[in-house]
Image (tube, grey):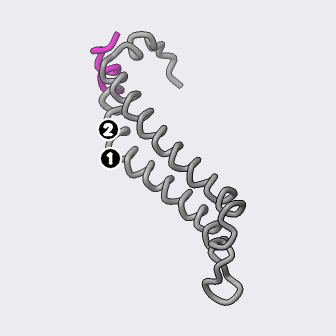
Amino acid sequence: MSSTNFNWAAIDANPKFQALHRKKTFFLWGLMVFSIIYYFLLPIGAAYYQELFNTKVWGVINFGLLFALSEFVVAWVIAFAYSKKANAQFDAMAQEIINDVNSGRIK
């Protein structure tokens, strides 16, 4: 295990780190707002749009049940979207910062 001490204040002040943090925060807030809105559509819909949620789709399966199950699908889609974005952009930006720290450009 290495006992290297990093200057976290210098890393935090680095424009590359600031850009990474800004991009990641903006993206995560967007995902969070979307997921909260989608999550609360279920109880709001069940309370105020009972006719729609009671609409039979197939046999005993109604729209409300399908909507409730879709929340699991949406959670997986959100996780997939984040992992794609992280792998494509955030990880590369973080690696650039790590390389700068290791090479001594950030002290």
Q: Amino acid at mark 2?
A: Ala
Q: Which mark is residue 88?
A: 1
Q: Where is residue 78 drawn, in percent x and y?
A: 49, 53
Which one is nearer the viewer's eye here, 86 or 47?
47
Relative to 101, say whether 26 is above or below. below
Q: Quadrant of residue 49?
A: bottom right
Instruction: Report whether 39 appears left or right of 19.
Output: right
Query: Magenta span covers which residues?
Result: 98-107
Dominant SS of magenta comes to helix
Which one is nearer the viewer's eye here, 42 or 10?
42
Does residue 104 show up magenta in the picture?
A: yes
Which one is nearer the viewer's eye here, 68 or 9?
68
SS state under label 1:
helix
As measured in the structure, the alpha-carbon distance from the residue carrying label 2 to the one carrying label 1 is: 7 Å
Instruction: Look at 56% across and 57% down and name the residue there.
Output: 75
Does residue 85 show up magenta in the picture?
A: no
Instruction: Report whether 41 appears left or right of 85.
Output: right
Relative to 60, say whether 25 is above or below. above
* CB atoms of marks 2 and 1 within 8 Å: yes
Q: Quadrant of residue 104?
A: top left
Instruction: Report whether 35 appears left or right of 103.
Output: right
Q: Where is residue 14 drawn, in percent x and y?
A: 33, 16
Q: Residues within 10 Å of mark 1 (few under 14, many from 20)?
A: few
Q: Where is residue 52 drawn, in percent x and y?
A: 62, 72
Q: Amino acid at mark 1?
A: Ala
Q: Quadrant of the C terminus?
A: top left
Q: Identify residue for label 2.
A: 92
SS state under label 2:
helix
Instruction: Look at 29% across and 19% down and name the residue there.
Output: 103
Instruction: Report whether 60 appears left or right of 11.
Output: right
